[in-house]
Amino acid sequence: MRRPRVSALVALLAAPLLAALGQAPPAHAQAVIGPAYVTRVVDADTLYAEIGGRLEVVRYLGINTPRIEHPSYGRAPYATAAREANRRLVEGRWVYLMFDGPVRDRLGRLVAYVWVGNVFVNATLAHHGYVETATGSTAAYTAYFRELEEGAVRDRRGLWRDPDAVTYHRPRPTELAADESDDPLGTVVGGRVFSAPAPFIPTPSPSSSGGAISSGSPSFLAPRGSLRTMP
């Protein structure tokens, strides 16, 4: 089988990819890695992706799955709906990861903003009402995510369509603390990919929509002047 050609963009991203997988390059080289193929979505803020032949856990930066403690139904229905929203966006797709600070957390997971096509996934999930802003987060987009979350609550989108969700919502702390309190599943890193290999690496296209939650969903390109966006 012929090996796929690697585009100029992918070659450009090779150095930061190697950096995220174990080496420490200059800070400016940590901006973007990818494409990474999403093999499975764990929940609304965590996924497994194949990057350079390794299975990596990617934790979304600046957002959490909302913790809704319903007295009759518990957390499960809300967590499931949030996970499905994330799955529809990224599972089985090629994504790019953008970093804002340390590449990994102390569990060894990559911690990143996630893009599929021109869709800013972290922000899209916040707009549609399936994630909350991580309280105490130092991420550059924290205020942006908060604004999107407040709009979703106000307009009753996603989980917030249910009045009980607002009533029994318990805001969660920064990403790592929130996950440690819930004993997360998505903590195994650095394993080999034993499932079928990822498909042919496509030539990245900034015009690709990447599959939104619903037709007509906004792309949520990052606000200018804060972080580098994808080419």
Image (tube, rainbow, N blue to C red):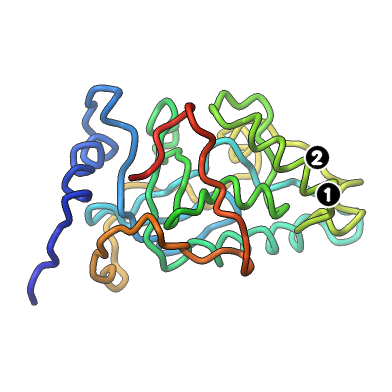
Give the image location of residue 64, x and y in percent: 64, 42
- Dot 2, crowdedness within 10 Å: few (<14), some or many (≥20)? few
Which residue is nearer to you in this view: 175 or 116?
116
91 relative to 102, above or below: below
Which residue is nearer to you in this view: 87 or 73?
87
Which of the 4 image quarters holds residue 159? bottom right
Question: Is tag 2's residue or tag 1's residue first in the polypeptide sequence?
Answer: 1
Residue on which disc 2 sits: 170
Check disc 1 and give the amino acid type: Glu
Q: Residue at x 21, y 50 (%)?
A: 10
Q: Are marks 2 and 1 in contact (CB under 8 Å)?
A: yes
User: Which secondary structure, mark 2?
Assistant: loop
Give the image location of residue 106, x and y in percent: 44, 30
Left-right relation of 73 to 223: right
Left-right relation of 153 to 198: right
Residue on which disc 1 sits: 69
Q: Which mark is residue 141?
A: none
User: Which secondary structure, mark 1?
Assistant: loop
Give the image location of residue 84, x and y in percent: 62, 65
